[in-house]
Image (cartoon, rainbow, N blue to C red):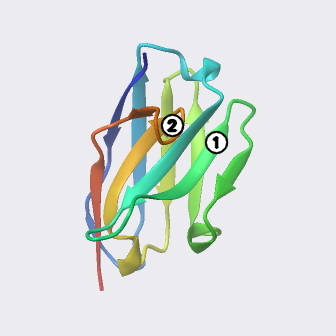
Amino acid sequence: QVQLVESGGDLVQAGGSLRLSCSASGRRIASINVIGWYRQAPGKPREFVAAISSGSIVNYVNSVKGRFTISRDNAKNTVYLQMNNLKPEDTAVYYCNTGGPRGNWGQGTQVTVSS
């Protein structure tokens, strides 16, 4: 079973950038079909943000298209989420996931965007 650890969350001003990292252990990410990022804001359900396949096909929720970029480094066994032009509505705990909603989750990393 794969273990996931997110990092890189911080407090930033609107318009700023952050890069989140999802470090995997217990399994090589090259063998994982899809790895995704989700987020959960206070009082709201967890929502899909972005995903990348083993063939590097990417998918994004409409609200982050053009601002966020998901990538993977198989050698480092890590998936990244580059977030640019951050907005207050991006404030949430960001989670890394494999295997979908009933799969493996990390502990999350807090992103706070001030206006």
Question: Horizontally, is 95 left or right of 109 in the view?
Answer: right
Label at residue 79: 2
Alpha carbon separation for disc pair 2 and 1: 9 Å
Examine the image and state in which quarter residue 36 appears: top right
Q: Where 45 sits versus 13, above or below? A: above
The picture places residue 43, in percent across and down from the top left corner, at 27, 71
In depth, the one of 11 and 24 nearer the eye is: 24
Residue position marked by numbered label 1 in the rendering: 52
Q: Residue at x 45, y 53 (%)?
A: 38
The picture places residue 92, in percent across and down from the top left corner, at 32, 64
Q: Residue at x 40, y 30 (%)?
A: 23
Image quadrant containing the N terminus: top left
In depth, the one of 44 and 2 nearer the eye is: 44
Circle 1 sits in a helix, a strand or a loop, which is it?
Answer: strand
Q: Where 53 sits versus 9, above or below? A: above
In the current view of this chain or complex, which residue is farthest to the bottom? 115
In depth, the one of 4 and 17 nearer the eye is: 4
Q: Residue at x 62, y 21 (%)?
A: 30
In depth, the one of 84 and 109 nearer the eye is: 109
Question: Horizontally, is 110 left or right of 57 in the view?
Answer: left
The mark that comes first in sequence, 2 or 1, is: 1
For the image, the number of numbered tags is 2
State if disc 1 and disc 2 touch (CB < 8 Å): yes
How packed mark 2 is, by other alpha carbons closer than 10 Å (few <14, some 14-19, many 20 or more), is many
Closer to the eye: label 2 or 1:
1
The picture places residue 34, in percent across and down from the top left corner, at 62, 35
Examine the image and state in which quarter residue 66 appears: bottom right
Q: Amino acid at mark 1?
A: Ile
Image quadrant containing the C terminus: bottom left
Q: Residue at x 71, y 38 (%)?
A: 56
Circle 2 sits in a helix, a strand or a loop, which is it?
Answer: strand
